[in-house]
Image (tube, rainbow, N blue to C red):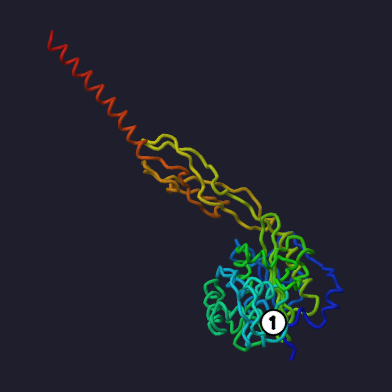
């Protein structure tokens, strides 16, 4: 049986067909099953997602189980990045060196940094490097797969199970396009991951140059990273991350044939960027207004965070913002103290809400001065009344 290869044995034919794609664009873009027939996607399982929408922008059999092949290495790399140990040296074990398929061809006893092994896993899909990463971080392959399954569960990958770090066929290892898209969305938030996955080439300390197998990197506008995968069982697979105009998209195709991996991924991305946009409704730290607070004077109202949404371009419309300030506010107020909420609505539908906060400290001194002034006024009035009484007594 053929195992993991760089792309597959027909790599030359794939590279010769630099993807002529048919992208069907709709005036109003539907979601989920309805959109599955709108695009010329041939892969049996595929999905397109963005961070700010719970539902997919496009989906086909996204919950069906499928062998993840080398897309497994995305989770392996995420764990390596999150460990903060990329600088550490790794001694290659005989077991890791013996792992076959696509490989860096390491030898037992050789030393590499964890960073070098991660680049080898992501750029050239090295199975032996992935095994070495697993042993180093997990203490053993079993220890690392336990880490993988724990992290997958934390990321909401509820229909996935991992039995190895590289993606070679294993009956106990499976995932779905939807779960892998969730993994991709998380990976897209890690700058170190994107620095690795978005690198076109990397030179090891021994002088060997690794070339990224993701052919859409540098050719499809906006692509910042991704991972290819192939086994006989899984077919051609690709997880792709792209960003344009402040909009992040993640696509996953599983079980593609030949160049369909590239054309389907490109069609999905172009569909997403042409049909959807990311709107900034409230900017982070945006000044929303000014209010008078007793014993403090005028205080700025500032948005605690950014509020955005990803919508179909056809769904754009006017929206309203309403400031809801808490009824009883008195100093002292610390920076970031909640003063209320700003609620954004479109028609009768609430889009979202953000806390309103105070940008700077409103000290107790402010109220003390105010009380002092009030006390001085009261004392002055009392003295004036006393003097009037004395004058009456003298008469």
Q: Measured along the vertical axis of the image, is residue 253 above or below residue 331?
A: below
Label total for image: 1
Expressed as whole percent of the image width and height from the top left, the position of residue 229 reads 71, 78
Structural crowding at the residue carrying mark 1, measured as other residues with C-alpha within 10 Å and reported as few (<14), some (14–19) or many (≥20): many
Quadrant hosting residue 175: bottom right
| Residue nearer the viewer, 313 or 230 | 230
Query: In which quadrant of the rendered image does the N terminus lie?
Result: bottom right
**From this viewpoint, which residue is outermost toward the top?**
395
Q: Measured along the vertical axis of the image, is residue 79 above or below residue 395?
A: below
Residue at the disc numbered 1: 106
**From this viewpoint, which residue is outermost toward the bottom?**
1
Quadrant hosting residue 205: bottom right
Quadrant hosting residue 29: bottom right
Residue drawn at (73%, 65%) of the image: 269
Query: In which quadrant of the rendered image does the C terminus lie?
Result: top left
Q: Is residue 158 left or right of residue 34?
A: left
């Amino acid at each position: 049986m053929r195992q993991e290869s760089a792309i597959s044995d027909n790599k030359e034919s794939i590279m010769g067909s630099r993807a002529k794609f048919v992208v069907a664009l709709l005036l109003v873009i539907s979601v989920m099953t309805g959109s599955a027939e709108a695009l010329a996607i041939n892969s049996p399982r595929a999905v397109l997602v963005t961070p700010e929408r719970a539902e997919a922008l496009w989906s086909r059999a996204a919950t069906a189980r499928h062998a993840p092949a080398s897309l497994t290495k995305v989770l392996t790399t995420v764990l390596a990045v999150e460990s903060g140990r990329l600088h550490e040296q790794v001694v290659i074990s005989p077991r890791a060196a013996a792992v076959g398929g696509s490989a860096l061809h390491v030898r037992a006893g050789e030393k590499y940094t964890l960073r070098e092994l991660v680049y080898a896993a992501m750029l050239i899909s090295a199975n032996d490097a992935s095994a070495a990463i697993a042993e180093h971080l997990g203490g053993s392959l079993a220890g690392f797969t336990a880490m993988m399954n724990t992290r997958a569960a934390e990321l909401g990958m509820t229909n996935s199970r991992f039995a190895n770090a590289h993606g070679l066929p294993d009956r106990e290892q499976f995932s779905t396009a939807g779960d892998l898209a969730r993994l991709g969305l998380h990976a897209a938030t890690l700058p170190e991951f994107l620095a690795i996955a978005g690198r076109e080439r990397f030179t090891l300390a021994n002088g060997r140059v690794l070339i990224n197998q993701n052919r859409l990197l540098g050719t499809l506008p906006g692509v910042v990273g991704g991972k290819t995968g192939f086994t006989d069982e899984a077919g051609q697979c690709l997880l792709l991350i792209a960003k344009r105009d402040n909009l992040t998209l993640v696509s996953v195709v599983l079980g593609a044939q030949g160049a369909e991996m590239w054309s389907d991924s490109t069609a999905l991305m172009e569909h997403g960027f042409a049909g959807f946009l990311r709107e900034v409704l409230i900017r982070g730290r945006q000044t929303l207004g000014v209010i008078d607070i007793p014993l403090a004077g005028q205080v700025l109202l500032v948005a605690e965070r950014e509020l955005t949404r990803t919508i179909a371009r056809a769904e754009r419309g006017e929206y309203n913002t309403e400031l809801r300030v808490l009824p009883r506010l008195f100093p002292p107020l610390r920076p970031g103290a909640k003063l209320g909420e700003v609620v954004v609505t479109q028609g009768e539908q609430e889009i979202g809400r953000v806390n309103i906060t105070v940008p700077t400290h409103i000290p107790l001194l402010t109220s003390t001065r105010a009380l002092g002034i009030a006390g001085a006024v009261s004392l002055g009035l009392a003295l004036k009344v006393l003097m009037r009484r004395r004058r009456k007594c003298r008469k």
